[in-house]
Image (tube, rainbow, N blue to C red):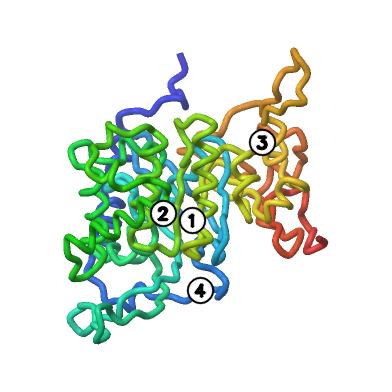
Amino acid sequence: MAKENKNYLSGKEIRAIAKANAKEMKRLEAYKNRKAEEHEFLSQMKSSENILEIEDLHTFFYTEQGVVKAVNGVSYDVPKNAVVGVVGESGCGKSVTSMSVMRLIQGPTGQIVDGSIRFKAYDYKRDEKGNPIPNGADGYEMEEKVYDIAKMPIHEIHRIRGKQIAMIFQEPMTSLNPVFTIGEQLDEVTFIHTPGATKEMAKAKSEEMLRLVGIIPENVYGAFPHELSGGMRQRVMIAMALAAEPRLIIADEPTTALDVTIQAQILDLLQDIKNKIDGSILLITHDLGVIAEMADYVVVMYAGKVIEKGTVYEIFQDPKHPYTIGLQKSKPTMSLDDGTELYNIPGNVPNPINMPDHCYFKERCAKCTLKCSGDYPGMVQVSPTHFVACHLYDGVEDNG
């Protein structure tokens, strides 16, 4: 038997990994929980047209086997009043990126290691003690600020999470608390994010949000989650996300576990709400049909990286990356003849603990060239709004 087996870790290697992980997690936890002045996490947007800019984001998970690079240098923007769809197969880093934006990565094993998440917030003006400044009427003075969420101490994230950026999770039954009524859970949003909110004010706001998503408040406000259908629970989740009037809604697989008819209703509701709140939506899904219907821009992710991004027309009518082309070919259509085998992309995603230096899609790509064994390809601009990370387009610049 060979003395070395690369498929297994020795006890010495496991102890070395644990020691290195513990040191790095301690450093990152200390940074996350530090006390910081506001100017330390204020920033500037690269484009005034964007509401969110994610730049070179790295989010890792420290495990006994090594460091899982779930998000490994992701960059994309969310423009104002737009729907950006993020698509890719399971495990590509879509949800981890969105959880990083919300700062919901579970520590100490999960950490944002590097990168920027710039968000244009509309926040309360605050005095020297950090308290909101009244404007003399019933409200408070507001001002526009750009926060780098990745650099914010975790105790400051309440300025953003829930109020400025809201999230609609995949499974509403696990997101709603089964022991509190719908009304109690909706009212809590107003109590947390509106200074001086009264019980009457919170109830009025909750009922307004329920009506906005097509629910009669009298029938649902006093009900418990288990008394509602899946579609109704998802509408409640959307109402909860809207209660604090966010500038950005992150919808993470909002139609999961819903039947086709209810899916269509939820998607129509999201599109209608986007226009009413004058905000943006970051839509995360693996369903290309949903992306084609809802999105203005599309980001395609693979193995923790963005491999292509552009307008919805460019991605669907002129896809460049072999992975994007493979995803579209894998989608079942009504035109398939009886007995025709549905296309699937061969091979498997590389191990996220031991990622190669070359293109991650190389072993699965039918258009692989000698260049693909070299360095990982950089992002190439093939039109003003279309970008692709593939050696097939090296040297191509803005020929769209």
Which residue: 39% across, 51% down?
Answer: 167
- Sequence-wise first label, 4 or 3: 4
Q: Are marks 1 and 2 in contact (CB under 8 Å)?
A: yes
Residue lying farthest right? Answer: 399
* Amino acid type indicated by mark 2: Leu
Reading the chain from its start, which is encountered first: label 2 or label 4?
Answer: 4
**Mark nearer the N terminus (1 vs 4):** 4
Residue designated by label 2? 212
Q: Nearer the viewer, residue 240 or 281?
A: 240
Location of residue 17 (image quadrant): top left
Query: Label 3 vs label 2: CA separation?
Result: 35 Å
Q: In this view, does 361 lie to the left or right of 313?
A: left
Observer able to see residue 373 = yes
Residue that badge 4 annotates: 45
Tell me: residue 195, above or below residue 352: below
Question: Which label sits on residue 273?
Answer: 1
Within 10 Å of the Cα at label 1, are there few (<14), some (14-19), or many (20+) other Cα atoms?
some
122 or 62: nearer the viewer:
122
Q: Where is residue 5 in the image (x, y as percent from the top left)?
A: 45, 23
